[in-house]
Image (cartoon, coloured by chain):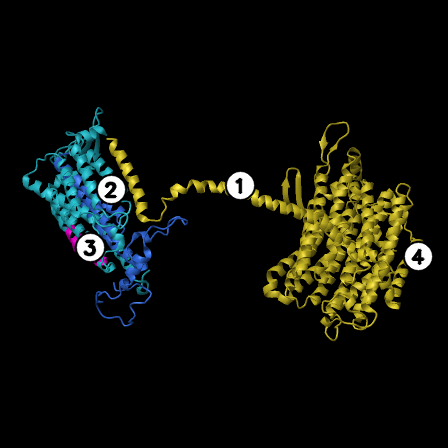
Chain colours: A yellow, B cyan, C blue
Amino acid sequence: MTEELQQIVLWLIPAAPLLAAIITALLGPKLLRYKSHLPCWSALAVSFVCSLILLLKILPSVEQAATPVKGEVAIAQSAAGPQVMASGFEWFSVGSLHADIELRADSITAIMLTMVTGVSLLVAVFGSGYMSHDPGYPRFFAAVSLFVFSMCMLVLSGSFILLFVFWEAVGLCSYLLIGFWFQKPSAAAAAKKAFVVNRIGDFGLIMGIFLIWTTTFQIPGSDVLFRPFQSLNFVDVLGNTELIKVVALQNPGRIPLICFCLFLGAMGKSAQFPLQVWLPDAMEGPTPVSALIHAATMVTAGVYLVARCTPLFVMAPYAQMAVSGIGAATAAIAALTALTQTDLKRVLAYSTVSQLGFMFMALGCGAAGAELVTPAVTAGMFHLFTHAFFKALLFLAAGSVMHAMGDVIDMRRFSGLKHALPITHWTFLVGAAALAGVPLLAGFWSKDDILAVLKEASHSQEHGLYFGVIRAIAIGTAFLTAFYTFRAYFMTFWGPERYPEEAGHHPHEATPIMAWPLRTLAVCAAGIGLIVGPTHLFGDYLQKTMGLTPELEHHLHWSVMFMSSVIALAGIGFAWMFYVASPAIPASIARAMRPLYLISQGKFFLDEIFTGMIVLPLRGIAILATLVDKYLIDGIVDTVGKVPKSLSIIPRQLHGGVVSSYAGVMWVGVVAAVVLVLTMF
Amino acid sequence: MMTWTQEHPMTIVGLVLWAVGILWLMPGRRASKPRPHKIGVLIVALGLVTFCLSCGKTQSELADDVMFWVFAIGALMSGVLMITARNPVYAALWFALATLSTCGLFLLQHAPFLAAATIIVYAGAVIVTFLFVIMLAQQSGAAGYDQRSSQSLLATISAFVLLGAISLTLQSEKIDIVRPVVVAADSSADSAPIAGNMSLTFNLSPEPPVIVPVMPGNVMSKAKGKTPVGNLKGLGKSLFGDYLFAVELAGTLLLVASIGAIAIAPRREQGAI
Amino acid sequence: MTPDEQRFLLVGAGLFVLGAIGFLTRRNLILMVLSAELMLHGVSLTLVTFGNMHQTNEGQAFTIFTLTVAACEAGLALSLVLSLYRKSHSLDIQLWSELRESDMSGPDFDSSAERGKLSSYDDIPTLTPAGIAPKDPPRTTPSTGPTATRV
């Protein structure tokens, strides 16, 4: 494949959704109306095909071309891994900072792209059925196309600047789609909340980028200072491990600071404790949006960022430990909250938060030893990959349930849907099993990888105890995951058949246009882990990314696999016992441990704590500022305004509106002027 | 200032008497009974005579003098009575009289055509129209606002300050004009540099007189034509020769004004703009 | 300058000043216009005198233009006065003081009394409309003033 063709393929991936977004936005409301999905579908299909070409054809060919070459160029090439660049144009140039719009694809990009475009395509297909009667149909597809464009650009960007731009752009799309039904006050509030909480993270990200840019390095033996990372390109910042190492030696605090800032950005976007509060509320958006943005793709951007910046994080073990710790805390808190939620989508939302915590737990394991970095990142990214499929599947299935139940999502109001909604039931079951970690399904392999990495990390000498605790949390959380997932499953699909009155007499099963994406995703969720996990296809491919060292030997962790299977099955078993065999148990447990139950149901009262700690003081300051503004500032301004008014009391008498007096004033002036002239003679 | 009062006591006295008479006759700020009318007229007449006498002795003939006195006193007295009249109809009639007197003064100034034209235009058209409007608008008789005046003191004092300044300036010795010297048509300009031009000279002692040249063109044309001033022929030549363009403009102005008046005056339902 | 010419100029100035006094003091719209005409008379007399002094025709020619402009002015002024009168049923200039400062009190006219007095005269004999009677009869509408409609 020629270079030009490669560039065209690369550009097509983001360009097609952008074009679709523009077309839909311009023509949608008047011309396309309920055919607005067509541009979106075709654009996503084009993007998906191009991503596959990139994944399977272009990158391997680049790698082959690069390998045999010897010499310095080849070394530089291999340090950055196989990559494809597509040059664009210069965006702006300020001083030494040159921001170019150009695309850069390497292994991790290709994997992310394939996953994003594939899931997006399926969700878009599902969405055209789900949203079929919504008046905002064109708006929905315009926003989805815009989101896919932004997400593709986010992963394709070759520099931190472009990454930040599209980091914000996906946040914007998320805002637009959470607030899709903006007439609903709760949706508008949720959209605002998501946006504001994300701002905190974005602040961290841009601070991190500034710090990277201002990092200076003094060449030993001379007093020449230069900025090694001032181009902000990934290749320049992350590609040269040796350079990072010497910079870290010279400025011991700088790299960890950068890592903490970047991780703050990742925390905001990927809903990590304590910034996870926005994600459950984001379920106010349409369910396909929840599936696409708030489960499968956008929230993984934080994981992607941390994985991408691995070369930096390697130099900051404490930052990595923080990543792990935050991930563990998030995973545990979210799993405990999910135990008692009765809203099906909220259960899934908390499980998303929990699984993102798992990914961060894995990413941080590099702190335990340099040899663990690559497996840790691989495990985290692998879980991201499989999670995208089964979580999208679960959300879409929940959407199908919602569709059938007349937009009712409270699990206490319906049950026993397995006969009424057979397709939804089976696909949900597959997704739930994959999430719970039932052997051979997707989630099993990726979660197993994470547990294995944690196990290795807990054996390390330096931070063994720390990672041991985290490993225990991970195992507990895995058990809870299996439990609450199947709690939701049993509550929804088993038990006596009950429908809410909103559903009408007979709940209708998903239409084919909704059923086929479900089936496709179910197949993926079931099989994709087995295909790319134990065969190490995924790991080998990912490890060509710069900053990772390819693993030479592969081994399966049989003991870990056995343990996680037992945990998963135990969780499922408990769920079956509690919610099918003897439904009285949960109530009695809740009664026995009422405080704990209330904490869980109240979502650990994080919203309330934030309200008390941040919102109320700010509101008090605002009231104070209002008072100052109203009485002090306005008072001064009003006083200044009164001065000319009081000065004008006398001259105002001239403006009585009477024509004669105006003429009189003029006359007096004329007389004065003429007399003055005459007296000069 | 003091020298003025010493040099021209009659002018000052006349002006003051005149102003007092006007104030006497003028309706007050509030509606009130009119003051005795005859006293006011007497004061004004006294002031007027004193004022006009202050001009000094003239060389003109007695008949001219008498005519001037009649017309001047008539015009000014009518003016005073017009602006102080409490009945607008009377005011219009006094205005007509003032116009007639002014036309008499025009005659004395060798402007018979102008006098006739003014009488035709004003007395024949304008006054009649005004009277019509007054009578139509004020069928109720004397209206309240005609019994009252506004800012009469300010207006009178400032106006008489101006008049005093003008009359004192006119009477001062410093101002004089160089009479035009009518030269023969064939005389060259070189032989008499100033001849044929008319200049206005201000005697600002001790400086030498400033000579302001005045447009020579018309003087030359008049010199060629040998037509005396005030002759209808000369006026016609001047109007339709030198000022032809201006005459056309004035005609256009009349047309525009009449269209405007037609557009403004009717009621809305009758087609006002 | 001879006293002979001086006195004509003085009479002109006197007429001008008298007109100015009238314009400033009178409150009747028509009298104000008449006063302005008196000022023009003064100017005309001065122009004619100057022309005589300099033995030219310019003074008189210019006076003719003044006369023209005065005629235009009178016609327009009358039509404006009429349209103003139609709105307020009065010729009082002080009724038209909308341009004053908003918080200042209006001029001290007893408007209600004057207006009421004016509009209550309905039975005064008026001019007979001349020419062919219009087909559409209602020349007067109750909303407009009785006197103005008969002009």
Q: Give the range drawn in magenta.
A: B117-134
Residue B133 located within the stretch drawn in magenta: yes
The image position of residue B239, as x and y in percent, is 18, 47
Q: Mark 3 points at which residue?
A: B89
State which tag comes first along the sequence, 3 or 2. 3
Residue B31 located within the stretch drawn in magenta: no
**How far is mark 3 from mark 4, CA to CA?**
123 Å
Q: Mark 2 points at which residue?
A: B156
**Occupied quadrant, residue A489:** bottom right
**How far is mark 4 from mark 1, CA to CA?**
76 Å
**How far is mark 3 from mark 2, CA to CA?**
23 Å
Amino acid type at circle 2 is: Thr
Amino acid type at circle 1 is: Ile
Q: Mark 4 points at which residue?
A: A562
Q: Which of marks 4 and 1 is in front?
A: 1
Residue at point 29%, 37% (across, down): A672
Which residue is more in the foreground, A552 or A374? A374
**Outermost residue, left side:** B62
The image position of residue A160, as x and y in percent, is 71, 45
Residue at point 21%, 65% (across, down): C127
Mark 4 residue element: helix
Chain letter for mark 2:
B
Q: Is residue B196 visible?
A: yes
Q: Name the residue under label 1.
A: A636
